[in-house]
């Protein structure tokens, strides 16, 4: 009998680490200012995916460490993304079972809410640093995250299906 979700069964740690390496490289690509505002935080989206599907491998501590890597790579205030990712990971982890049992549409709403909470943390940190930050930039990444969430699920499940059939 085939498993319901093959990704939950045998996901090697190196596959999780490799996916984070690819996404971190994607996030570090420089994008000019008018186009960077609607882009979602791809690292946070993948972090949310692994938090939902493999919580034994990725947790709040890993979210903090990945956030530190994003801070170092994006030349932002050290700890800013680490705190934001920790808050988002906590929100996702707290309601993980309810989120995972819903359809992709409701999952997208929950992940977009976690992204909005993460963006709020970045906004508050930038307020304390007295850096300019426009409020409309809070909403655009959350909306695009909600739109990209079902596609990410389909891509990751098709990769897992390909890996399972190849064995």
Image (spheres, rainbow, N blue to C red):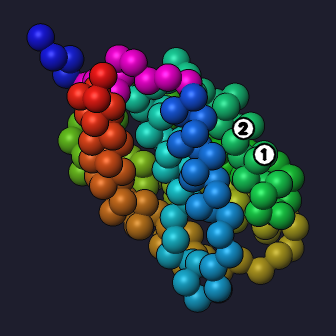
What is the magenta range?
5-13
Q: Position of residue 129 (x, y in %)?
A: 87, 67
Inspect this view and state whether residue 43 appears. Answer: no
Q: Position of residue 55 (x, y in %)?
A: 49, 23
Q: Relative to 5, is 95 on the left or the right?
A: right
Q: Where is the C terminus found, in terms of image quarters?
A: top left
Inter-mark Cα distance, 1 to 2: 6 Å
Q: Relative to 15, is 30 on the left or the right?
A: right
Q: Badge 2 is on which residue? A: 64
Q: Relative to 22, is 112 on the left or the right?
A: left
Residue 125 magenta-drawn? Answer: no
Mark 1, Cα crowd under 10 Å, few <14 / some 14-19 / many 20+, is many
Q: Residue at x 57, y 53 (%)?
A: 23
Q: Position of residue 36 (x, y in %)?
A: 59, 78
Q: Badge 1 is on which residue? A: 68
Inspect this view and state whether residue 13 appears. Answer: yes
């Amino acid at each position: 009998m085939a498993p319901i979700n093959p990704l939950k069964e045998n996901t090697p740690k190196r596959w999780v680490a490799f996916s984070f390496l690819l996404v971190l490289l994607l996030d570090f690509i420089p994008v000019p200012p008018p186009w960077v505002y609607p882009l979602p935080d791809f690292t946070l989206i993948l972090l949310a995916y692994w938090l939902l599907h493999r919580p034994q491998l990725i947790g709040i501590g890993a979210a903090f460490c990945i956030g530190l890597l994003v801070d170092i790579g994006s030349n932002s205030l050290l700890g800013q993304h680490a705190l934001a990712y920790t808050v988002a990971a906590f929100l996702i982890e707290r309601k993980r079972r309810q989120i995972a049992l819903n359809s992709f549409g409701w999952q997208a709403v929950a992940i977009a809410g976690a992204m909005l909470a993460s963006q709020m943390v970045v906004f508050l940190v930038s307020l304390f640093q007295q850096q300019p930050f426009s409020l409309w930039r809070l909403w655009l990444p959350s909306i695009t995250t909600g739109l990209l969430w079902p596609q990410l699920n389909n891509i990751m499940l098709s990769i897992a299906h390909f890996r399972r059939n190849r064995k």
